[in-house]
Image (cartoon, coloured by chain):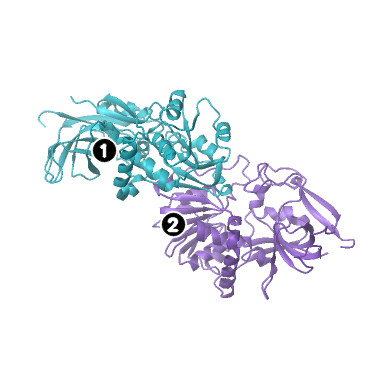
Chain colours: A purple, B cyan
Amino acid sequence: MGNEINHQVRLAARPAGTPAPEVWQHVTGPVPEPGPGRFIVRVSHLSLDPAMRGWINEGGSYAPPVELGSVMRALGLGRVVASEHPDYAVGDTVTGFVGVQDYVETDGTGLRKVTPAEGVPTERYLALLGMTGLTAYFGLFDVGAVAEGDTVVVSGAAGAVGSVVGQLARIAGARVIGIAGGPEKTGWVTGELGFDAAIDYRSEDVSARLAELAPDGVNVYFDNVGGEILEAVLDRLAMHARIVLCGAISQYNAEGGMAGPRNYMNLLVYRSRMEGFLVGDYAARWGEAVEKLAGWLAEGRLHSREDVVDGTVDDFPETFLRLFRGENTGKLVLRLRSE
Amino acid sequence: MGNEINHQVRLAARPAGTPAPEVWQHVTGPVPEPGPGRFIVRVSHLSLDPAMRGWINEGGSYAPPVELGSVMRALGLGRVVASEHPDYAVGDTVTGFVGVQDYVETDGTGLRKVTPAEGVPTERYLALLGMTGLTAYFGLFDVGAVAEGDTVVVSGAAGAVGSVVGQLARIAGARVIGIAGGPEKTGWVTGELGFDAAIDYRSEDVSARLAELAPDGVNVYFDNVGGEILEAVLDRLAMHARIVLCGAISQYNAEGGMAGPRNYMNLLVYRSRMEGFLVGDYAARWGEAVEKLAGWLAEGRLHSREDVVDGTVDDFPETFLRLFRGENTGKLVLRLRSE
């Protein structure tokens, strides 16, 4: 590791609303040496995910909160550059919880090896071939129980998970309506991704458009956004519909706190359910799912787009905010420059 | 019917908030004669249900709204007093949608015959042995999927449905915590009904008490009330919990409109689901369920209490409001005086 420097972004304060620069502390230090049974990963890609906003709240979310003073938790990908671990050799590619830092010293907990295929961009293993694709897969097929002929609505349709969900629903023989912000995004999902229709929530009346596009109601709603869009879909459910709760990005930075769907009792009117899940619960089936996703990708039935920002770990705070401004199309990844 | 009078309560205006007397119109008219294939029921008991509040909103709820000028929709029970229908004879007891009136002229749609058993009060066929018991049965067993060893929480625990739900959960081998208002109600559910514990939401901190009483979380929550109590339970779910949506009585008269649970994303944290249902969807299995309920009642494993108000159809508007003031214990029934 010589005289390389390890840059880290640590959590300095808990944010109220949108995380301001003061929330983060930029720290530099020496590159660690691996202890016995441990190894060092040089991080090359960081995954930027809305869920990270929940991790820095005092109460945490589904995961314990990131402690003040700790390196910010992040999924990512990198290569082993030094190893005292029998199962990891220099040159191995690993993915999992690496944190917002150049180098991580680890015993391998929370990481797994991947073997990048010829011609597949590395960042795709954080997107369609990583947690993003797995989240879409288990959310739609297992929680949403999508069936041929269903009408599926997905919000955040041009985002990392949403863009995969809609394509998988098409593969399942469903009709797919995506909700996204702006003509570039709606054009992408109905064009390259093959969605049947899209609603631009910035310029269109979501409720009115849903009434036109889903006259018989919505069988599966995959929700990434919460708020008014969730309420609009709740007003338009088919009988025995399934709402898959994956995210609520419209609510995470609300300073008055999250709002709940005022019309949640439509779940009774339409004998429907709303259900949350975590991809980690399906770990035993990740292999099966990645194989299917990779197969569909190879056949050209799935498309993946990664929105790659080139930079350094110090660019994390600003890049992260792009998620909440709706500035990314596809999976947002920070690719770390080698210095 | 000679010179008998038919009293009716009709819907005169749509209420904002708590239904004021002006919402109702009291009408009298002659007792109808049955047309061909039709019959006349003299109504003896009216069922008072929180769901009726939804039926008089402009949008209706799971049922179409009661039209302005129409007789108020109500479940009830009565006897056939005249018949031109081959399947219904004078003296038959029928139950179903009779409306808030002394006499109903009908072809039998929405009604079914019951055969009152010796020693069973008639009003029990609107309670444990009627829609109320069926709602508890299918909600808890089918939607809630209660299992032995589960911790079950039920709100409106001393109400018509809630009091049955808790007892059924005990029969299923679950631990049952009831939430009700006031010491008389909490004492009844932990005493005669055998609940394991009860929380008095009027004098106790529901969240703090739930933390004490359900340290390992709540597996099934049967919700009759919505609002802050729903939020308190959402903060205390076990993994893979089931929230059964049956009612939201705390919200029905809210003039600012219903509030949704702000922490609904706990469904993701706890990989849980929230699901609505209607007892009508299980009509094919009503016979099986009533048989079980009647059996447990006969064995002394189930108790039923009916809160019977003696009066006339003109007492409906005021009696109905008792539901929203939490004044009833067990099933609220208006027993109509014969004049």
Residue hosting label 2? A219
- Measured from the top left, where is residue B325 in percent x and y? 41, 27
Amino acid marked by disc 1: Ser
- Marks 1/2 in contact by CB < 8 Å: the verdict is no
- Residue B25: image quadrant is top left
Q: In the image shown, does A287 or A339 lie closer to the viewer?
A: A287
Q: Residue furthest right?
A: A3
Residue B10 is situated, as x and y percent measured from the top left of the image, at 27, 34
- Pointer 1 residue: B70
| Total numbered labels placed on residues in the image | 2
Q: Amino acid at mark 2?
A: Asn
In this rendering, would B164 be left or right of A284?
A: left
- For marks 1 and 2, give the one nearer the viewer: 2
Against B239, is B301 above or below? above
The chain to which mark 2 is attached is A
**A248 sits to left or right of A322:** left
Q: Residues within 10 Å of mark 2 (few under 14, many from 20)?
A: many
Which residue occupies the foreground of this view, A90 or A266?
A: A90
Please tell me which residue is depicted at 37% across the width and 30% down the height of the picture.
B330
In this rendering, would A309 be left or right of A221? Answer: right
Q: Tell me how far mark 1 sits from mark 2, CA to CA.
A: 34 Å
